[in-house]
Image (spheres, rainbow, N blue to C red):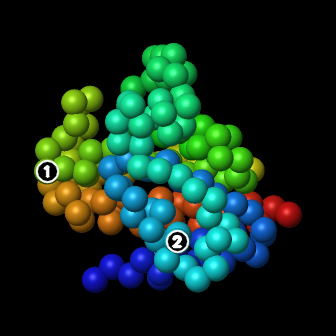
Amino acid sequence: MHDLTAMGQAVGALLKERKQTIAVAESSAGGLISAALLAVPGASAYFVGGGVIYTLEARRTLLALADEDFAGVRPSSEPYALRMARAVRDHVGTTWGLAETGATGPTGNRYGDGAGHACIAIAGPVEHTLTIETRHSDREANMWTSTRAALELLETRLKQEGAGR
């Protein structure tokens, strides 16, 4: 059993405490990252918006990003995720942008990544990227794993950023 509220609670509390906001651009997680952040009571204090950026058309229309903005950057990579995190942060006007891209399964993607590959990035007062590889073909399990990894990355960086004050 997955508990969305429990997954988003620590991040939500840190964002509220700091009066910071977030926007999310996720792909293979399919909206679970946003759902976990929104499951926390009072999420309107920190969650501004985002979207499931599953196709090039979604990237073009929902984030107003041109293909040229990604010239030379391979999808499902850390540099790609970081550009998406920066873009959603800037486009929506938040303190933080969080992005995820990958291959949930049951097979890999056309870029050569196997099932369970996900790249996650945060952009805000600090930036960080992470790649995870479950090597499992279970699509839903991979979605939950990448969601948990994204929220844990953000929580870790929020705590580090807060400690540096």
Position in image of residue 140 (x %, y %): 23, 63
Is residue 50 visible in the rendered structure shown here?
A: yes
Q: Name the residue rendered at 61%, 74% in the picture.
A: 43
Q: In the rendered picture of this protein, how many numbered marks are placed on residues?
A: 2
Splitting the image into 4 quarters, where does residue 20 fall?
bottom right
141 relative position to 154: left or right: left
Q: Nearer the viewer, residue 63 or 103?
A: 63
Label 2, residues with CA under 10 Å away: few <14, some 14-19, many ≥20: many
The residue mark sitting in front, 1 or 2, is 2
Q: Amino acid at mark 2?
A: Leu
Local secondary structure at mark 1: loop
Find residue 74 and name its label. none
Label 1, residues with CA under 10 Å away: few <14, some 14-19, many ≥20: some
Q: Amino acid at mark 1?
A: Pro
Position in image of residue 24 (x %, y %): 53, 53
Position in image of residue 92 (x %, y %): 65, 47
Q: Name the residue rendered at 45%, 68% in the picture.
A: 35
Q: Name the residue rendered at 39%, 26% in the picture.
A: 74
Is residue 157 visible in the rendered structure shown here?
A: no
Residue located beneath label 2 in the image: 38
Considering every residue shown, the one lying at the far right of the view is: 165
Find residue 106 and name its label. 1
